[in-house]
Image (cartoon, coloured by chain):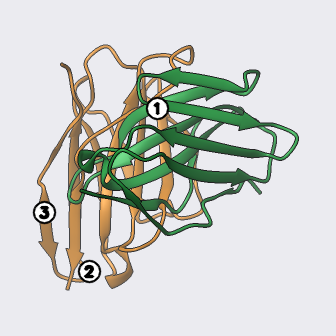
Chain colours: A orange, B green
Amino acid sequence: EPEVTQTPSHQVTQMGQEVILRCVPISNHLYFYWYRQILGQKVEFLVSFYNNEISEKSEIFDDQFSVERPDGSNFTLKIRSTKLEDSAMYFCASRRTVGNTEAFFGQGTRLTVV
Amino acid sequence: DQQVKQNSPSLSVQEGRISILNCDYTNSMFDYFLWYKKYPAEGPTFLISISSIKDKNEDGRFTVFLNKSAKHLSLHIVPSQPGDSAVYFCAARSTSGTYKYIFGTGTRLKVLA
């Protein structure tokens, strides 16, 4: 069964460093999302991406965040200058079309900023 | 502000009995409600959904009920099995913007053998 895959599974980085979280969505999907879950808190929307551009972003998704779909298969989330409070699980998700109800999530990348 | 709330952080149920997980929402700009199941160190896995124009959807042991007037939905699992032990997230799909999903805080279900 097709699935969303994310790499790495765990990333440790020093505060102020840049990180890139990678995702390979399901191949025929058109809508892509990044969510995050800080430990013990709810899953929060960061950004949605459609037709090679950001469709919507939350107030969390400030200038230090960016997303790209560089080659038609990968979908990346870049955090330019990490802060301690960026430590969280980051989930990538994809959905085929608007007509499809559910989004499929990857297994997540645990980002630890030290 | 679009809010989805799960007021019970945890629930314990005996194997074979019914598990009922609840969710409330405060905004009507949702077209679908979904339940996701999450194991530790894994991503949310889609379980079942319901359209905002329906009041019940059933899939095997899982049934979701929607009460629009009360802005409340519930997930029933019957019979509950130990493998159902996980965190269950209620999510609502927003009709504004790009149909993003708004998640509740989750309920940890423990099914006791």
Between the C-alphas of marks 3 and 2, the distance is 18 Å
Is A35 situated above or below A24?
below
Q: Residue at x 66, y 25 (%)?
A: B56
Which of the two discs, 1 and 2, sits closer to the camera? Answer: 1
Is B51 situated above or below B41?
above
Q: Which mark is residue A16?
A: 2
Chain letter for the residue marked with disc 2 in the picture:
A
**Category of crowding for the residue at label 3, using alpha-carbon neighbours closer than 10 angstroms: few (below 14), some (14–19), many (at least 20):** some
Q: Do labels 3 and 2 share a chain?
A: yes
Q: Which mark is residue B29?
A: none
Q: Can residue B98 be seen in this view?
A: no
Q: Which residue is drawn at 21% across and 75% down?
A: A112
Disc nearer the start of the sequence (3/2): 3
Residue A28 location (% of width, % of height): 31, 13
Depth order, front residue of B61/A77: B61
Query: Which type of secondary structure does the marked residue at label 1 adopt?
Result: strand
Residue type, numbered disc 1: Phe
Residue B85 location (% of width, % of height): 30, 54
Q: Which mark is residue A10?
A: 3
Left or right, residue A14 beside residue B70: left
Residue B51 location (% of width, % of height): 66, 24
Q: In which quarter of the image is the C terminus of chain B?
A: bottom left
Residue type, numbered disc 2: Gly
Residue type, numbered disc 3: His
Q: Residue under circle 1? A: B62
Depth order, front residue of B110/A81: B110
